[in-house]
Amino acid sequence: MIFSSAYATVMGVITPLIDEDTIVLSDALNHNCIINALRLLRPKDKGVYRHLDMSDLEKGVKGAINRCQHLLIVTDGIFSMRGEHAPLNLISDIAAEYDHAFERGINVLVDDSHGVGAFGATGRGTEEVTQAERIDMLIATLGKSLGVNGGYIAAGASVIEYLRQTSPFYVYSNPITPSEAAATLVRYLFDNNILATGLTYPVVPQGDEEIRFQVSADHTEADIQTVLEVLKNFMDS
């Protein structure tokens, strides 16, 4: 799900996730966008755990039991001012251990705008480096290492559908431009071993930006099916 920027993604995602039965726990050195998002909201309570201190995080989780239905843990992946990364595997373990204690469970939200594309063996960021297995929502920018504008959230289908209907920064804001979307898709296709060309103005009229696939007699039906599956995965992400 794509927003106009990563900052807008954070602001637009956190807002509809929180209600009067939610407690939020946030790392002390989280990015300004997370801090401002939380300032706008009125959850049941807000807690700040010491930077990268998993004992303090666990203490906060335990302290929220029987006080709310839903717990949201929010952290940066890479902390931009220090270059440190969150131990997402340990955060995931804590969330998994205490999830049953909350009626609506524990969710983990990570803003890895400074990690995706630059950190990890394949550039998948902090989640890849820490081998975390329970990150519910991952936010990142399409700028920085990916070279275009916009931001995005990757999450389960039900979360994405909910956010499409309830996120004010998505519903009431302009999206990225067609040419930026095309550039993102072209890069996604390239990363999946598919070569395609983005056509933008003045090659095509403004507003008619497109991606060109060049099919030859050497391509098989299996090749075409593979491309369709990759496109479907992109649309579902």
Image: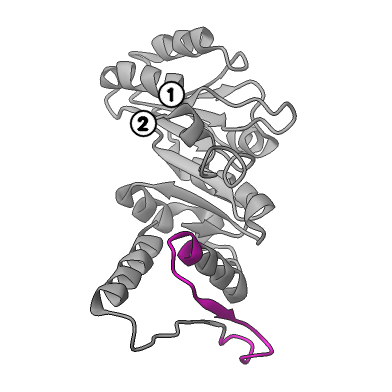
Residue 156 appears at what percent x and percent y? 33, 47
Quadrant in the picture for residue 125: top right
The span picked out in magenta is 188-208
Q: Inspect the image, locate mark 2, and give the three-letter code of the amino acid beneath it.
A: Glu
CB atoms of marks 1 and 2 within 8 Å: yes
Residue 200 appears at what percent x and percent y? 63, 83
Residue 92 appears at what percent x and percent y? 40, 24
Q: Earlier in the sequence, mark 1 or mark 2?
A: 1
Quadrant in the picture for residue 226: bottom left
Residue that numbered label 1 is attached to:
89
Left or right side of 9 for 155 = left
The mark total stands at 2
Q: Is residue 80 magenta?
A: no
Residue 131 appears at what percent x and percent y? 42, 29
From the image, give the main secondary structure of the stretch colored magenta.
Answer: loop
Q: Nearer the viewer, residue 153 or 14?
A: 153
Residue that numbered label 2 is attached to:
133
Mark 2 closeness class: few <14, some 14–19, many ≥20 residues within 10 Å: some
